Image (tube, grey):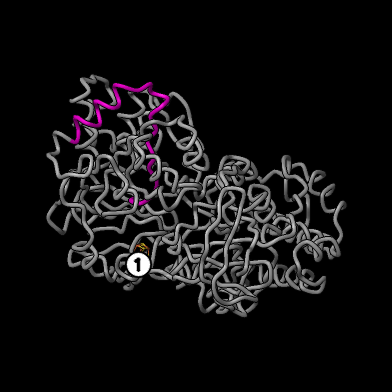
Amino acid sequence: MIACTRDCYDTCVFDDNFRPIKSEPTFGFTCSRGNADLRRNESNRLLSPIVHGREASLEEAVREIVRTVKSLRPEEILHVEYDGNQGLLTWYYPARFWNAVGSASTDYSICSSEGHAALKEVWGCSCGAGVEEFRRARAFALWGSNASVSFIHGWHLMKDKYKIVVDVWKSETARKAEKSYVIKPSSDGWLALGVIKVLVSRGYGDLSNVEEPERLKELIDRVTVTDVAEVTGLSEEDIVELAELYHYYEPLTVIGFAIGRTFDGFNSVRLISLIPAVLGLGRWFYYSNTYTLGIDFDYLRGLHLARPSRVVGMAEVGEEVEKGKIKALFVWNSNPVLTLPLGDRIAEAAQEGRLFLAVHDPFVTETVKAASVAIPAPTYLEKHDVVYGYWHDYLVYNEPIRPKKGITEPELMRALAKEYGLTHPLVEEDPWEAVNVALRGTGVTLEELREKKVVKVKRKVPSSRPTAKSVSMPKRPKDGVYLVFSSHPTSTNTQFTEVYGYPKELLTNDYEGSITLMTDFGELTVQVRRSELVPKGVIVAYKPSLKLGLNKIVPPLKGRTGTPPINSTQVELRKP
Ligand code: SF4
């Protein structure tokens, strides 16, 4: 058995012949990436360590990294990793070395953290619906989620049911839904508040279903449906209709990660999640179930024994590199040159010798191309690991089905520790023992997982009532043109662009040809194509189009808990 480790809702499980298993949670089918994984595994691989542009031995590469680390203050060194591979040993465990030497860490905020924090504030935990609830639901309301593209097994359980989509463009999912509403960027919180107001005023909803209802009452008293229509761009009839549909269908609300990456996204997630509460449906939403399983991620990262010297927002990495505050980056599991705001500054600084950039990756990414030192890593098809999903409840013990190329993340971490002369319980604890401890809260032991390969975890969903204590009035988004990002069926961010390519054009409502996008942080000339699916004031980029270098103009802004609001990137346009 082997589970796909990409940052994806589905976490497909495959048999030993790499066929998607017929049973839950993969139902016998996979996506274009799963279908091409074996082929991709043999292409664009980093096969030898590279040190300052030439092939080198692993020992030399490790020596060069450690020499640099020892020459700098810990707070000048930052490790950058994200969910390029969701394995416990691949993503989490290697941070132990960096925490033990006290280097800086990121805040892991680039994707879902804003929504997790928002839901925790209202519900005590972001835990929501799982596979059983998806089966049971008779309708779905999807906010900022292109699920037919990015969440195909969830979509499999939705597709014969009534679906309502709220998005800023007529996405693939909106086109397949029974009903869709295209709203102005960053106006989701307003719409949610408007829906709650209508539900309450028509007697369909009851504010006493939440703790501190007077707070929510105060907010709905401060808005009119006319205000909501003005901010969202919908008609008043649309808002009433959406509330009526919520009342009639009682849909399971799916909150896409995109919402947390908008201006005021934290508050929008809170307000959207309160719609089912007001309807008396309780925790009838889905966002991400990462924290439902009971895995101790902090233990894996060693935070019980060592802390980073400081935390750098993922929004600010490029900016800090540019300002010279960060002198060394150690990167794995991510491609920050293309995916973080101002990530191009990382490549620029490395090329100019202002930054030591070390990268551990299976593939020759843009970050690898810019690296001072690059070390090959095996893909998920080539190593043992434990994998979890953030939708379904299965843990999977991954066993390699292809020969290993490169050095695994725990092996490299230990090689770095040895060269450094570091003796610390965090690096001395056996990686599998660390996994076993981290799994304690799941009720599954490593031994059981090794024997059964796939084990369903008993989910832990708190029964606490939601609270409106801290929800606030949504902020009014500024008028203007917004660049937004949408999922694409053939890529996970920039992964798989080497197999399937990437869209070279962005979508607009009213212009065709070459156009320059400008922010305070730079400008970029791109090709755009007119599409009736996109409203005025919106430019849609599929995420793999990050290959065009779009992140070089994305401002280093932070949401309430640090997530950059990249789906609210306001741009000025210059047409030739
Ligand atoms: S990217 Fe998602 S849908 Fe595709 S194989 Fe991986 S988990 Fe499955």
For the magenta stretch, what is the residue range?
Answer: 61-85
Can you see residue 283? Answer: no
In the image, taking residue 540 as reference, residue 367 lies left or right, namely: left
The location of residue 443, given as percent across then percent down, is: 36, 42
The location of residue 32, given as percent across then percent down, is: 34, 72
Q: Quadrant of the C terminus?
A: bottom right
Tell me the element at label 1. Answer: loop
Judging depth in this view, the residue of 58 and 88 nearest the camera is: 58
Residue at 34 percent across and 39 percent down: it is 92
In the image, taking residue 270 as reference, residue 328 lies left or right, namely: left
Q: Which residue is mark 1?
A: 26
Total numbered labels:
1
Q: Tell me if the residue at label 1 has its CB under 8 Å from ligand 1.
A: yes
The location of residue 517, given as percent across then percent down, is: 58, 60
Q: Quadrant of the N terminus?
A: bottom left
**Residue 65 is a magenta residue:** yes
Judging depth in this view, the residue of 36 and 540 nearest the camera is: 540
**Residue 563 is a magenta residue:** no
Can you see residue 105? Answer: yes
Q: Quadrant of ligand 1?
A: bottom left
**Disc 1 marks which amino acid?**
Thr
Residue at 37 percent across and 42 percent down: it is 81
In the image, taking residue 3 as reference, residue 522 lies left or right, namely: right
Residue at 20 percent across and 40 percent down: it is 51
The location of residue 288, given as percent across then percent down, is: 50, 53
Residue at 15 percent across and 58 percent down: it is 402
The answer to whether 493 is drawn above or below residue 325 in the figure is below
**Within-10-Å neighbours for mark 1: few <14, some 14–19, many 20+:** many
